[in-house]
Image (cartoon, grey):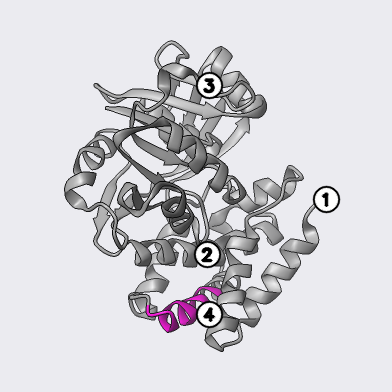
Amino acid sequence: MRIAILGAGSLGSLYAALLSQVEGVELFVHGRGIHGAHMAAHGLSVEGERVFFVSNEEVFFSLDEVGLPPSALASIDFILLTGKSDQTEMLAGLAQQLLSPEGYVLSLSNGLGHAELCQGVLGPHRVFAATSTHGAWRPKAGTVHWAGKGETVLGSLSGGPGLEEAQPFLSVLDQAGLSPQWSNDGTAIVWRKVLLNIAINPIAAIAGVNNGVLLRPDLFSSALSTMLEGASVARLERVILPDDSELEDQLRRVIHATSGNMCSMLQDLRNGRQTEIKVLNQAIVERGERVGIQTPLNQMLAAVITALHVE
């Protein structure tokens, strides 16, 4: 099976490293900047939950600054988009060039709207919904820290492929230790991940703490209230979600599982990068306005994070 990772930042690098260990997988990893250049020249180191090294002789690393190699075009069976939210359209365009005639795409980017954007570029018949709760961050170029084990969930979307088409990739994810799950409701799995992100990322970023600190009662209460505010919007959009007590349990489990993780929003603020607040809490505010409810907690967090952006 030929697999491509497009937008290999922290999470993409983790998936690339783990998938590279599966027999029979031919891996193509497309990165950018200093981290991408380091992987192409020297390989990729993994630390944290596991410690190992991926040689640049085992994996084909390419760079956005150089472009796609002709040998990879129209040859990839499954493509994971793992870049930032503002890169999704560009990465979907690259995927269009790389996909084999029977290939499929899934986006692990945070936020709302990515799967729909991919469907618009590639066609509904090529796109799965997907989420990940694995925690990863980059301590330095060429190294990814696996901060906490989670799961990878794939799901079907309207007009899209189903379990039969996903099964070969689910098997590979299982062999890689990425804990795959399947859902027939792709929209719901995306929303459930968004609810976790809106609860954890902005509060951890503002407080400047790893995820585990949010288990403190005062911070957890704020995170949960933010999550349930978002859940109210989702339910008015007719998204099928668990009841509030199950959402609370899931939030607690994910924070505990990724307790050592520095969330991507905190990493972005510390490194002077734009965050994904527009497709997370700000998206909740905008969707709340459309369905006629106020979302003051999400609005406040979106405003504060936006004010902290370094222009």
Q: Amino acid at mark 4?
A: Glu
- Image quadrant where residue 124 sits: bottom left
Residues under numbered marks 2 and 1 in contact, where contact means CB atoms less than 8 Å apart: no
Q: Which residue is mark 3?
A: 62
Mark 2 = which residue? Answer: 215
Comes first in the chain, label 1 or label 4? 4
Nearer the camera: disc 3 or disc 1: 3
Q: Are marks 2 and 4 in contact (CB under 8 Å)?
A: no
Q: Disc 1 residue type? A: Glu
Residue 242, position as x, y percentages in the image: 33, 75
Camera-near label (1 vs 4) is: 1
- In this rendering, would 75 be left or right of 310? left
Going 41% across and 61% down the picture, which residue do you hit? 190
> SS for tag 1?
loop
Q: Answer yes or no: do the residues labelled 3 and 1 have beta carbons within 8 Å?
A: no
194 magenta-colored? no
Label 3 vs label 1: CA separation? 29 Å
Span shown in magenta: 226-238
Q: Which mark is residue 311?
A: 1
Seen in the image, is 223 located left or right of residue 266? left
Q: Residues within 10 Å of mark 3 (few under 14, many from 20)?
A: many
| Mark 4 residue crowding within 10 angstroms, few (<14) / some (14–19) / many (20+) | many
Q: Which residue is mark 4?
A: 229
CA–CA distance between discs 4 and 3? 41 Å
| Dot 4: element | helix
Quadrant of res 276: bottom right
Residue drawn 73% across and 42% down?
271
Circle 2 Cα neighbour tier, 10 Å, few/some/many (<14 / 14–19 / ≥20): some
* Cα–Cα span, label 2 and label 1: 32 Å
- Who comes first in sequence, dot 3 or dot 1? 3
Residue 76 shows in the view: yes
